[in-house]
Amino acid sequence: MSLRSLLPLACALALAACTPSATAPSTPAPPPRSDAQVSLTYLGVAGWQVTNGAHTLLFDPYFSRVDVDNDSATILPNEALITRHAPAHADGILVGHSHYDHLLDVPTIAKRTGATVVGTESTMNVARAAGVEPSHLRLARGGETFDIGPFNVRAIRALHSLTGQPDAPIPANITMPMAASAYNEGGTLQFLVRFEGRTILFIGTANFVESELEGLRPDIAIIAVGLRDKIPDYSCRLMRALGKPRLVFTNHFDAHWKPLGPEQMSIGDKGQKSLDTFPDEVHACAPETKVVVPVHLQPMSI
């Protein structure tokens, strides 16, 4: 028997020494799915809530839905709407970027719920100026993995949709309240959340860094669809990078200046056409993926 023919046997006897490191997975395998009841709720704009009843995580919660006629005018959170729609307790709030339709309500919700706020330096500066305790702030730049209660969170470096607005930071020496125009992007993050055997990716604005997503393999992807037409092959490149997740929810598609209520899904002909064509784009390259357009404030079991 030749030396070459003995190599497979040698590898079997010493697997650790013979397995090339290049075959190691880029991310840990998700834990087995539990039987716990977990629900996901669309809060409007780019906002989401995931909970098992005992623990809750929020992403970009924004209930005030300010109708900004003049972006140099000072804007304030709507306390009544926050009281009506925000949970009584939350473990954490993940903030994708610092525009007002993602961040305006976050400090108020954090102080009411006791949540830890996770976001960029700009998000930290706003939350700190609005009175959130330093012990409830967690800076993320992308690449960090950490636990918030039972939620395992990975922050992912990302890009904002192509609006033509500069990616300017929000300085530390701000005073609150601020004008809508002062809520600069301040960098963009996406988040991969592992909870009760589910792996959920939150994308709050229609753009991404492809190399940052490859190998993540979420089974649920929450994907911003507004302005995606500005990103070449947005839907299929996302599906390929993510390994064609089993379930996709549309995100950031509504008229964010309209109040939550019976008319919140009236988004105009152009917006409706964009929303209607998204499932076809996904199915063109991921035919087995289920695409769901969520109804505001209606919990969905996942």
Image (cartoon, rainbow, N blue to C red):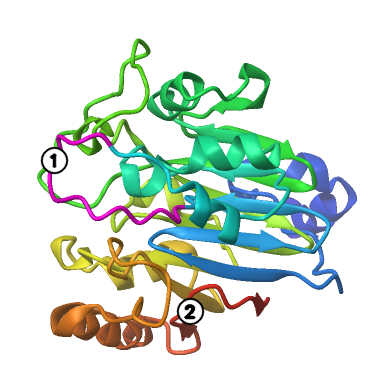
Q: Which residues, given as a range, are shown in magenta?
A: 62-74
Magenta portion: prevailing SS class: loop
Q: Which residue is drawn at 22% across and 69% down?
A: 233
The residue at which mark 2 appears reads as 294
Q: Which residue lies furthest to the top in this view?
A: 173
The residue at which mark 1 appears reads as 165
Measuring from the top left, give residue 297's x and y in whole percent.
55, 73
Mark 2 nearby-residue class (10 Å; few <14, some 14–19, many ≥20): some
Q: Pointer 1 and pointer 2: residues touching (CB < 8 Å)?
A: no
| Quadrant of image for the N terminus | bottom right
68 is within the stretch colored magenta: yes
237 is within the stretch colored magenta: no
Residue 232: which quarter of the image? bottom left
Q: Is residue 4 visible?
A: no
Q: Residue at x 51, y 69 (%)?
A: 42
Q: Out of 97 and 101, give the one closest to the viewer.
A: 101
Mark 1 nearby-residue class (10 Å; few <14, some 14–19, many ≥20): few
